[in-house]
Image (cartoon, rainbow, N blue to C red):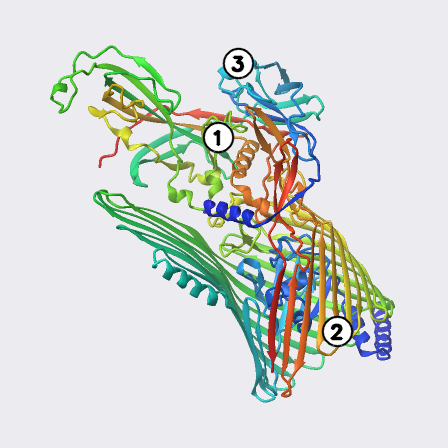
Amino acid sequence: MFAAAILTAASMHAQTIEKQDTLDTSYVTAVKEKMRNTTQTGLMRLDGDKLRSGVAVFGTPDVIKHLQMLPGVAAGNELMSGLYVHGGDGNDNLFLLDGVPLYNITHFGGFFSSFNTDVVDNLDFYKSGFPARYGGRLSSVVDVETKEGDMFKYHGNLSLGLIDGRIQLEGPIVKGKTSFNFGIRRSWMDVVTIPAIAYANHRNGNNPKASGGYSMQDLNARVTHIFSGRSKLNVIAFWGRDYLHAGLDQKESGSTMGINVSSMWGTLATSANWDYKFSKTLRGKLTGYYSRSGSDVGYKFDVNSSADGGSMRITMDDDNICAVGDAGVKYDFDFYKGDTHHMRFGASAVYHHYKATREYSQFRQMPGADGETDSNTDGNTYSAFEPAVYYEDEMFLAYNFTLNAGVRASLFSTPVRTWARLEPRAALKWLITKDLCTKLSYTRMSQYAHLVSAMYIELPTNSWMPSTIGAGPMISDQIAGGLYFTPQHFKFNLEGWYKTMHNMLTYNGANAFYPPLVNWEKSFTAGNGRSWGLEAEATYETPKLELSAYYTLSWTWREFMAYYPFPFPDHNDNRHKINLVGTWRPGKHWSLFFNWNYHTGNRITLPSHVIQTGHGLSSMLFEAPYNAKLPDYHRLDLGADYTFTNKKGHRWNFNLSVYNAYNHMNASFAMLDADANGNYYGLAYGLIPIIPTLSVSYKF
Amino acid sequence: MKRILQIAALLLTAVSCEIHFDLDNVSEPRMYVQYLPSPDSAYIEIAYAEPAFGNISNGKYVFLDSDLGISVNGQDMPVNYLSEQEAIELGFKAPDGGISNVRYAKVLTPKALMPGDKIDLRLDGRGVRTAFASTSIPPRPAISDVTVSPVQADSSEAFKVVMQLQENVPDNHYYGLKALIRTTTVIAHNQIDQPSEDAPEPLSETGFPGIPGIPGLPDIPGMPEDIVVDTLVQTFYTIAGQLASTADLNSLDLDGFANINYYNGFLESGIFGAQPMMLLPGKMFTDGAYSFYINSLDSSLWGSGLDFSTGGDTLINGPVSEDGPAVFSIVLSRKNEFRLELYRLSDELYNYCKARYLETFNMLSNFGVTPPNFTYTNVYNGLGIVGGLCGTVTPWYEITAPEN
């Protein structure tokens, strides 16, 4: 009875506020609705237009590089598409493309993300307060939705950047019923490098003969069919691939030598979803999907030599194949009960298949002797079944309180063990005034998949593996809360979080491009992580001018007792982070952009102690991981768009972007050095200078 | 692949811009300890570790004094610092050149340490915090069987060795393995020069009574007439290679094959050629057995019986100048043997050895693209390792040349 009274009062209050909103301008209402409609903390919504505008590094707008500017997010190494959210590890972000989880979301070793902004409709980015409908990763959710094609008109967009070209087409297949949206992107560096190498070979007389090149490409396709006002079907596909190869062949007086390296990696994701409105209050979305991410990396080495004493031949062949495949089905429901409940519930079942193998063989034949082969095959395949159910209810309570409470239950079953996890989620919002609210959230997340990598960068030799007895699921608990104030044209957010992560893994083996495949978990050490901090955002938005300032104060610690017996700071323990972002549209043709990035330097490990061992020699000791801090990082990016529309109504856009406009060489790595007097100092190296790029796009 | 990484790192260094920066997090000076107590060793290496951060002048800190306390099962033990001469005689690196902040000591226990003994260390150094550490002597490993079979691998003669332990080997047991090859050669020769400086140590030379005449010698074509037949026995000890095939070493389980310089070598690796030891986590064993290859034998060692070689840098003969007398030698017999030394390592010693091993590879951590370097320590307020170990040694096993 009491609950009913609360809900009724809440409903009336909510309706009153909605009516008040209609008195404001539509723009301000939109901003406020964003804030009010979101119970979750740590949520940022970006639409496709926003992602496509601004500074484009190498002339290619990048989703992840947009997210890196947000508070609470560390970018990791410069230019990479790292995403370290609230002290996360970078491999604990759930990337969803039209509801399909993706494992590999970057091209070119992490320089670019796989999301083609031409086809992106919107993006939801959660750093905390995760709704129960999301699961499987610890630190963030990046939920990307592609655009449905126009049901009545054909449109297209052609773009050419410094390193790639893009084509996007959309239009009706059956007017008003069926549409398509298609985007393709391909780099064209190899178009330049292949003729250049051919010319160099020609000048060398094809001895030695070199070959090589790199290309990346991806394709997005979406077909939408509307059966009726209640029923809609989407068939969606994504395919991305990187191919890198290099070779050298040489002939010399009876001997030949050849070395070839090739690497191919990519992702295929296909899905079909059927959206059906059962009634005005109940809607369901049935999705089936299949995805596969994998890589094939190999090298061959062949030496053949003939001499008087006989022939000699040495060959080495190495092939490393990693893949993870998911086949899943899920059914998600939205149900409105009156004005006071918005319930979401659903179930999913996913079959995971993991494969990581490596074959190495060596053949050696010395003059006058028989040939000998030495070979080795490593690797394994794993499978797992992961069913999950969830329920969440957004309840409008009394006194302008809104509560989104939910729970997610999942199983992860492998042939050797089954884990069960229950993840409670709750987010509470109190709308204090029309423009002011406060929120509080608690979430628990589980992650069953581990990224097996000997490095912190995206390499095709990295592989995903399931939880095993030696490396169980990771768990995070996060509390977040904040104050959100949105007077006219402004938005002020202040948000804090405290997050713990358990059973994290850190690599504890030798440096190698090839991480271990068999007993991989033995090369990792389990431990815990903690992160806490404050984020502040101030935004001023009008149709002509947008200015945002983001500030993050944070701490991130790791604790791996078997690895190092004391807590130590994380690589991305950036104490302060400031981002200033601005857009100015002085006229109908011009848009000017800037963003300035600053953060406390990343942490590295340097020798901390020296022992003089006599004979003028010394021995260096490393007291603790990440015991030193690189110089602070700062960078200004500038951009300008010039847009005009021709008589046919087609739009040209020229974008000039300047990355690192004042050419500040930020430290990428460092070492310890000493001057002539024996004084030690840090010596860092900056790698990335100013990078201006021009890109052009034509929209019709 | 590691070479490629290093070349890539050098290239990046060449094209980049240098930025000098001050180091934060200035470290305190620490005492360094290396104490690997076992039933066979009672020596401690202690050192004064000066902070590298904070622009401290090199050599400003000098080892002044220390007070070392060792207790075994709660009972204090006397400790003697070694003199420089004693340290030299024991093979430790003596501080006879430049600044040295290293000292050596010996723990005087009434009897050899035993498995299960608990050792506590306390180290006071002037101007530094008092350091503490403790460890236990792990159980002595028991080898129940060793089988050797010849194989052909990597184009050289090799042997597959299977070492079977009596005990069950769980994953969290850690071992260190050394294999030593002893080659005993009986030689007849006309002149014994000084042994080559390149000859492996230790090299013993024992005079044998001369063998008066060897039947058949005059029938050897080209046999010099002025040969003076004398005999001696030379014994060479060599480390038995990488203890794994190349393919196994490429099996991605690199940490399982960590080959570290153990004993008298952590601070001096690469200087005095300390004895390498293969780190073996329990996961490397299958049903209590570990199999590996001894594959580094020089095929020239396999000659047996009468063998004739002349001049030059042969294995047996030292370098001879062009003007000097020709050196002739005849190998009368040659015997090859090997033995295994297996150590059970405490967890902390394994962690330390592995960390030191990884340091040699981990230059990429400075790029922020790999996990960091660090020196594992179980010394509270200090650096280094106090880690027990206990070893067992097999008899010498004779190995015969595989038949081609």
How far across and down, in percent of the image, does residue A93 sit?
A: 63, 59
Residue closer to the observer: A161 or B189: A161
Q: Label 3 belongs to which residue?
A: B86
Marker disc for residue B270: 1
Residue closer to the observer: A633 or B31: A633
Query: How far, Cα to Cα, is label 1 from label 2?
Result: 65 Å
Q: Amino acid at mark 3?
A: Glu
Q: Chain of mark 2?
A: A
The answer to whether A344 is drawn above or below residue A650 in the figure is: above
- Circle 1: element type: loop
Residue at the limit of the structure toward the top, as seen here: B209
How far across and down, in percent of the image, does residue A215 sit?
A: 48, 65
Q: Chain of mark 1?
A: B
A138 left or right of B4 in image:
right
The answer to whether B257 is drawn above or below residue A118 in the figure is: above
Q: Chain of mark 3?
A: B
Query: How far, Cα to Cα, is label 2 from label 3?
Result: 82 Å
A364 left or right of A261 in image:
left
Q: Label 2 belongs to which residue?
A: A585
A381 left or right of A168 in image:
left
Q: Residues within 10 Å of mark 2 (few under 14, many from 20)?
A: some
The answer to whether B165 is drawn above or below residue A658 in the figure is: above
Q: Select label 2 or label 3 by which is in front.
A: 2
